Image: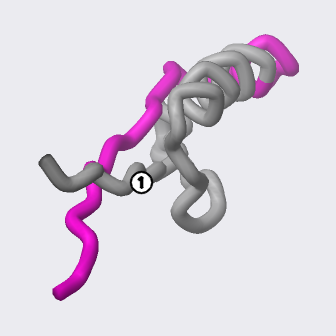
Amino acid sequence: MKTPIEYTIVAVPFHADAATHDELARKINEKLSGGYELYGPPFLSEEMMYQAMTKPIPPN
């Protein structure tokens, strides 16, 4: 049986400056410290910057 996972996407408004990357990195680091793992590379839309993340759900 496969281990169930929780899937989340971290998102921040995209601006062409370092603050966007710093904000995304801060949010990602919070999730990493909570047991999440990166799922693929960050991705962009015209207005947002995203990072997909997963976390195994422990059995009851």
* Amino acid, disc 1: Thr
Rendering coords of residue 19 (x, y %):
79, 12
**Mark 1 secondary-structure assignment:** strand
Rendering coords of residue 29 (x, y %):
69, 26
Task: State which quarter of the image contains the N terminus.
Answer: bottom left
Residue shown at the point (45%, 30%) measured from the top left: 11
Q: Is residue 41 left or right of residue 18?
A: left
Image height check: is 37 above or below 28? below
**Is residue 14 found inside the magenta-colored segment of the image?**
yes
Q: Is residue 1 left or right of residue 38?
A: left
Rendering coords of residue 8 (x, y %):
33, 43
Q: Which residue is mark 1?
A: 54
Nearest to the observer: residue 58 or residue 22: 58
In this view, which residue lies farthest toward the right? 18
Q: So how many labels did they put on this image? A: 1
Nearest to the observer: residue 11 or residue 1: 1
Q: Is residue 36 left or right of residue 4?
A: right
Residue 2 falls in image quadrant: bottom left
CA neighbours of label 1 inside 10 A, class few (<14), some (14 to 19), many (20+): some
**Is residue 30 found inside the magenta-colored segment of the image?**
no
In this view, which residue lies farthest toward the bottom? 1
Nearest to the observer: residue 57 or residue 30: 57
Q: Is residue 17 left or right of residue 45?
A: right
Nearest to the observer: residue 1 or residue 28: 1
Rendering coords of residue 4 (x, y %):
21, 65
Residue shown at the point (53%, 39%) measured from the top left: 35
Residue shown at the point (28%, 50%) measured from the top left: 58
Question: What's drawn in magenta, residue-wise?
Answer: 1-21
Residue shown at the point (51%, 20%) measured from the top left: 13
